[in-house]
């Protein structure tokens, strides 16, 4: 059964600044590079539509040796996760983000809806996240662990974005 959770983040940067960064290849390449050497991540596609919608596709290759022992038993070879994101401007200066992560082979998936809303002094980001791991008897434990990791990594990604914006404004 999938696990759902919310993450709320405040940023001093404006919605328009964050959204503009998401439309830049140099931002994504820097963010990937800052992610560390635990996995190899590639930026597969980045498009910005006339209406301002940003679409991003990345693939993360995780070596089997990096997986927890119980998970490694269910994975043949290295694990590949595909991350697809869209960021669309909507009314009132807000941006709606939709993201999905899929793991080929049916081991699991995840997704999030993120709302960037202007607030006094910056932006509030509300992430509504869903994670599902389809490994018998262990899926729920992995879902909780992934959720705990995302509760840390989403604010860290926003801190990176804020620092990147300060350097590239």
Image: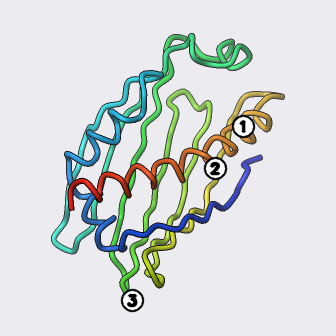
Task: Give the foreground label among 2 and 1.
Answer: 2
Indicate the position of residue 164 as horizontal and vertical percent values: 30, 52
Mark 2 vs mark 1, CA separation in Å:
10 Å
Residue under label 3: 92
Give the residue furthest to the bottom.
92
Residue under label 1: 145
- Is residue 105 toward the left or the right of residue 92 in the image? right
Instruction: Look at 37% across and 35% down and name the residue there.
Output: 34
Q: Are marks 2 and 1 in contact (CB under 8 Å)?
A: no
Residue under label 2: 151
- Is residue 143 toward the left or the right of residue 40 in the image? right
Q: Which mark is residue 51?
A: none
> Considering only order in the chain, which callout, 1 or 2, is on the residue closer to the N terminus?
1
Task: Give the foreground label among 3 and 2.
Answer: 2
Instruction: Look at 32% across and 33% down and name the residue there.
Output: 33
Mark 1, secondary structure of its residue = helix
Indicate the position of residue 156 as horizontal and vertical percent values: 51, 48
Q: Neighbour class for label 3 at 10 Å: few (<14), some, many (≥20)? A: few
- Is residue 143 toward the left or the right of residue 153 in the image? right
> Considering only order in the chain, which callout, 1 or 3, is on the residue closer to the N terminus?
3
Indicate the position of residue 116 as horizontal and vertical percent values: 45, 72
Instruction: Look at 61% across and 19% down and name the residue there.
Output: 67
Indicate the position of residue 17 as horizontal and vertical percent values: 29, 68
> Considering only order in the chain, which callout, 2 or 3, is on the residue closer to the N terminus?
3
**Which image quadrant is residue 165 in?**
bottom left
In this picture the colour scheme is rainbow
């Amino acid at each position: 059964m999938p696990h759902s959770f919310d993450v709320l983040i405040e940023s001093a940067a404006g919605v328009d600044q964050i959204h503009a960064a998401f439309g830049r290849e140099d931002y994504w390449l820097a963010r990937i590079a800052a992610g560390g050497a635990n996995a190899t991540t590639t930026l597969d596609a980045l498009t910005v539509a006339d209406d301002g919608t940003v679409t991003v596709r990345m693939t993360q290759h995780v070596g089997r040796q990096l997986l927890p022992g119980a998970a490694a038993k269910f994975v043949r070879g290295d694990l590949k996760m595909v991350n697809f994101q869209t960021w669309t401007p909507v009314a009132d200066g807000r941006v709606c983000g939709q993201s999905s992560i899929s793991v080929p082979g049916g081991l699991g998936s995840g997704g999030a809806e993120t709302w960037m809303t202007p607030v006094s002094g910056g932006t509030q980001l509300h992430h509504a996240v869903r994670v599902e791991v389809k490994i018998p008897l262990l899926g729920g434990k992995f879902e909780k662990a992934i959720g705990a990791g995302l509760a840390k990594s989403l604010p860290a990604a926003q801190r990176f974005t804020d620092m990147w914006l300060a350097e590239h404004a």
